[in-house]
Amino acid sequence: MTENPTPSSSPTHKVVVLTGASSGIGAATALRLAAEGHHVVLAARREDRLAELVAQIEAAGGSAEAHRVDVTVAADVRALLESVVATRGRVDVVVNNAGVMPLSRLDALRVDEWDLMIDVNVRGLLHGIAAALPHFQRQGSGHFVTVASVGAHAVSPTAAVYCGTKYAAWAITEGLRQELDPGIRVTTVSPGVVESELAGSITDPAAAELMRTYRRNTVPADTIAAAISYALAQPDGVDVTEIVVQPAAQR
């Protein structure tokens, strides 16, 4: 499941925009979808990482481009979508993957970190929806994929705010699915513990120690990429509403 498939000449190739594409799930998804023959548009703040990823994709025969984007800035995300449509003629998929996870207990009062999670995990998602939706509606087709978390379904100590943002992401995405015409598909992918840099944003010592124990069992980021690929590959009229993927030991 973790081996990238061979590119094909299938007419189902799509133009896919990925936020948070510079590492972890975003980078793994970019590599997998490019290998499947899709054109991947990589969006993140770390331009050097994006350039390396584009070079890796192109060296393997894939098609990719990079854009420096801060998802907390609505104008950045809107300009990204407008640029893609202007140059590629369409956008087929938006994977709202950008996220941060600086965990801490509420009584640590790390308000700046709470605000950061709200800005990236919730506002960033809304900015992606607002930027892409007019294009999808004009096309009469499109696919939103939200990368949420098992934290959208269960709360644990030190993760109250993070889980709150992921509950919000789940609810926003489900509301979007219910509101849209069937031609526009909507999927939530909720990963458990994944090999990524996400835990590197934790500055609270107690939360960092808990996370070291929590992350003893992980799945590769490409496992989540494969779930996203599965949702995208379904025929028109099939809506994969949600996929939860986690280590068996995380039960």
Image (cartoon, rainbow, N blue to C red):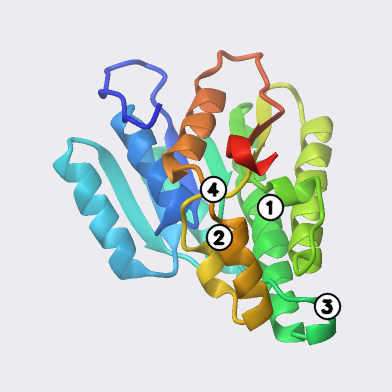
Residue on which disc 1 sits: 130
- Pointer 4: residues within 10 angstroms few (<14), some, or many (20+)? some
Q: Nearer the viewer, residue 81 or 201?
A: 201
Q: Which mark is residue 50?
A: none
Kind of residue at badge 4: Asn
Q: Nearer the viewer, residue 248 or 178?
A: 248
User: Split into 4 quadrants, where in the image is the C terminus?
Assistant: top right
Q: Earlier in the sequence, mark 4 or mark 2?
A: 2
Tell me whether the residue at label 2 lies in contact with that at label 3, contact meaning CB atoms closer than 8 angstroms: no
Kind of residue at badge 1: Ala
Q: Earlier in the sequence, mark 2 or mark 3?
A: 2
Residue on which disc 3 sits: 106
Q: Say which element carries label 2.
A: helix
Q: Say which element carries label 4.
A: loop
Q: Is residue 23 above or below residue 246?
A: below
Mark 3–mark 4 Cα distance, whole angstroms, equals 26 Å
Q: Quadrant of residue 75?
A: bottom right
Side (left or right) of 131 relative to 61: right
Q: Residue at x 81, y 60 (%)?
A: 164
Q: Which mark is residue 217?
A: 4
Kind of residue at badge 3: Leu
Q: Earlier in the sequence, mark 2 or mark 1?
A: 2
Percent x, y for residue 249? 61, 40
Q: Earlier in the sequence, mark 3 or mark 1?
A: 3
Mark 2–mark 3 Cα distance, whole angstroms, equals 31 Å
